[in-house]
Amino acid sequence: MEIIDAPSPNFDQRPAGRAPDMLILHYTGMPTGEEALARMRDSAAKVSAHYMVGEDGKVWRLVDEAARAWHAGVAYWQGETDINGCSIGIELVNPGHECGYRPFPDAQIEALIALIEGIRTRHPIPDRRILGHSDVAPGRKQDPGELFPWQRLAEAGIGLWPERLDDAVSSDDPTALQKDLAVLGYGLEVTGSLDAATGEVVTAFQRHWRQARIDGRADPQTRAVLKAVLKAAQSDGSSARNSSLV
């Protein structure tokens, strides 16, 4: 796969001794890919990613994988608060929810899969740490959104997807829901009430794993999907999956 070098000045050093073990997917959220590429190469913008994948399958490299790109902002996952410091960020050209959100073309997804496969030969990133921007910044970000084909990636061996669902989970216990979401990795305080923060996290979960319903309500089917994703995370068998799920 050909990669076009388009260096960005917007990066710094990763924390000492920290290699990337997480991958965050974004959409560019701008009218064109050219505008997004220019913004990520503008020192005044102070944003970047390691790679950008065009709708036609072209791939640009903006920041070396050894460096920390500035793509995640304020974010959290499984106790990590410096997501930029431990992740590789990939931007997918797509106008996003504010500029005409649309499906991701086959050529783009095929290029993304090939790119991730290459990255994982250099960095053993586990499936449970391949996430969307909305997963690590719920309530603040929506990308890559409910049209992103997470299941297709999982079928290619990339990321978590539940193999099967048990019966729908009928429970009105907010504490159990919050604990399950926190165990998966979301930054959610266990309050015992279905507060606004819980609704934001449920919405983020649905954008990734239950795309037919994006309403922030943990109905029995959403809870069943959550249980299945947790089970998949706990049995995650990729090469860097030795650390326990926290």
Image: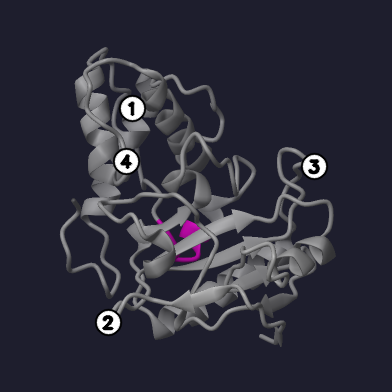
Residue for badge 4:
187
User: Horizontal and vertical percent for residue 30?
Assistant: 77, 52
Does residue 227 appear in the picture of this structure?
Answer: no
Amino acid marked by disc 3: Cys
Amino acid marked by disc 4: Gly
Residue for badge 2:
17
Residue for badge 3:
99
Q: Nearer the viewer, mark 3 or mark 1?
A: 3
Which residue is at a point 53% across and 38% down the rendered structure image?
Answer: 140
Q: How many angstroms separate mark 2 from mark 1 (CA)?
A: 38 Å
Asked which colour scheme the image uses, the reply is one colour
Q: Are marks 2 and 1 in contact (CB under 8 Å)?
A: no
Circle 1 sits in a helix, a strand or a loop, which is it?
helix
User: Horizontal and vertical percent for residue 49?
Assistant: 59, 68
Q: Upstream in the sequence, badge 3 or badge 1? A: 3
Q: Nearer the viewer, residue 44 or 150?
A: 44
Q: Nearer the viewer, mark 2 or mark 1?
A: 2
Which residue is at a point 60% across and 40% down the rendered structure image?
Answer: 146
Q: Upstream in the sequence, badge 3 or badge 4? A: 3
Task: Classify residue 50 as left or right of residue 34.
Answer: left
Q: How many angstroms separate mark 1 from mark 4 (CA)?
A: 18 Å
Q: Nearer the viewer, residue 75 or 131?
A: 75
Which residue is at a point 76% across and 44% down the rendered structure image?
Answer: 102
Circle 4 sits in a helix, a strand or a loop, which is it?
loop
Circle 2 sits in a helix, a strand or a loop, which is it?
loop
Task: State whether residue 128 is above or below residue 174.
Answer: below
Q: Upstream in the sequence, badge 3 or badge 2? A: 2
Q: How many angstroms separate mark 3 from mark 4 (CA)?
A: 28 Å
Amino acid marked by disc 1: Arg
Residue for badge 1:
223
Report the span colored magenta: 153-159
Does residue 176 appear in the picture of this structure?
Answer: yes
